[in-house]
Amino acid sequence: MNTRPRIIFHVDVNSAFLSWESAWREEQKNKQALPAEDIDLRTIASAIGGDQKSRHGIILAKSTKAKEYGITTGEPLVSALKKCPNLVIVPPNFKIYTQYSAQLMKLLSDYTPSIFQFSIDEAFLDMTETCHLFGDPIKVANDIRERIYKELHFTVNVGISTNKLLAKMASDFKKPNLCHTLFPDEIETKMWPLPVDELFFVGRSALKKCNMLGIHTIGDLAKMNPAILKAHFGAKYAELILHYANGIDDDPVVPDEGPNKGYGNSVTLKRDVTDFETASQVLLAISETVGSRLRMAGVKCNCITVELKNADFITKSHQVTLSDSTNTTNVIYEASCHLLKEIWTYEPLRLLGIRTSKLDDNDFTQMSLFDNPKNEKQKKLDMAIDSIREKFGDNSIKRASFLSDNTICPHKVGK
């Protein structure tokens, strides 16, 4: 029986997209592929996101100097440029960011096999069985932080605790390039004084209810009568946030399971969407990305799920199982539109997403007398488009519907 106390790290890249863009540019300067005088984005007011010329899109990451102007992640470029007219905006390059993310995960695997990649720029490490091989937890965390900067040329914060929740909370303390602890005996002094909305899973809607109940800090929530919380939030959610406020989290660090069980993507919208035409354009952009990823992996999906989040951050999802597996963009798009019509009551949307699952790498397709001959043409068209974009870049070919100046999102979303 294991008697070691749990040691969990949470590693979080500081302003990931901007850090990775800067690291890549430094690498290109060393290769003389960029001018030596090219300015480090991390030293000026800069941001990753959208297109500076068209002023469309949202801020995905910002520098420390940009933050001093009050620029926040997720705000529209138009708003950010009003705060800082000289803001340098660089469009995202997700291919580069994915490569840096993979390098980070490879480096972290030198310390433990128990890694859960929480997102492209953060991961949990269960160091319980391996930390003693490298030193005490704080020393090991600092060694990891310094090694990442030396070898990969970007900075991270590392949170250290006995569970995932507290480790993640710790990594969000003062930034950048620092390590912080948040052990159970430090909760009262380090976590309880924080505003309640800094607690994981307490969003805007929950914050309003908390404030109505006189709950303003995490400590207020931790000491709240459970019966009152359940009456206002429901039993399940009330129990979750009450546990979190008291630092209780038994969730294990489960390593990734290897081969992808599904492909999907979502987009946070730069403005609330209330009409189906605009929502369907977003679904088309996501369908292009998801279809491309399926084809690149040489697989097809048998199940499609549409997810939405409204302005009150309430999430809904709806799925359909297909009669035949597919990786064709139009099939994914049409199924997604049908699902959205069935689930959406036209409340303002903040997020739309598509997930595909039940993957199949068999290229066999059941033929039918009723098959639409356009389907085969569409498959060939998708392959041709993939080939052109692979050779000349994602923006080399677009659907006409994405050429409008007021389009709500690019023709593809993410990678």
Image (tube, rainbow, N blue to C red):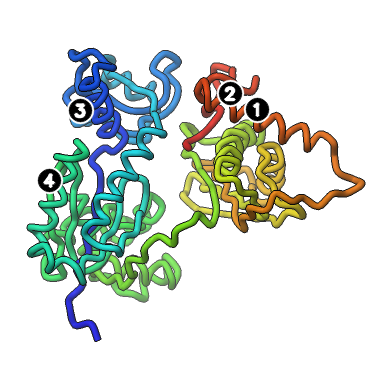
Q: Nearer the viewer, mark 4 or mark 3?
A: 4
Q: Are marks 4 and 2 in contact (CB under 8 Å)?
A: no
The residue lying at 37 percent from left, 72 percent from top is 239
Indicate the secondary structure of the residue bearing disc 2: helix
Amino acid on which disc 3 is placed: Arg
Label 3, on which residue?
42
Q: Amino acid at mark 1?
A: Ala
Which comes sooner in the sequence, label 3 or label 2? 3
Residue type at mark 4: give it.
Glu
Please state which of residues 250 and 390 is positioned toward the viewer in this rendering: 390
> Mark 1 and mark 4: span between their CA atoms?
45 Å
Q: Tell whether label 2 touches label 1 (CB within 8 Å).
A: yes
Relative to 158, residue 164 above or below: below
Left or right: 370 in relation to 278: right
Give the amino acid type for the residue marked by disc 2 in the picture: Ile
Say which quarter of the image contains residue 95.
top left
Dot 1 or dot 4, earlier in sequence:
4
Kind of element beneath mark 4:
helix
User: Is residue 27 visible to us here?
Assistant: yes
Which callout, 4 or 2, points at the residue further toward the start of the chain? 4
Q: Secondary structure at mark 1?
A: helix
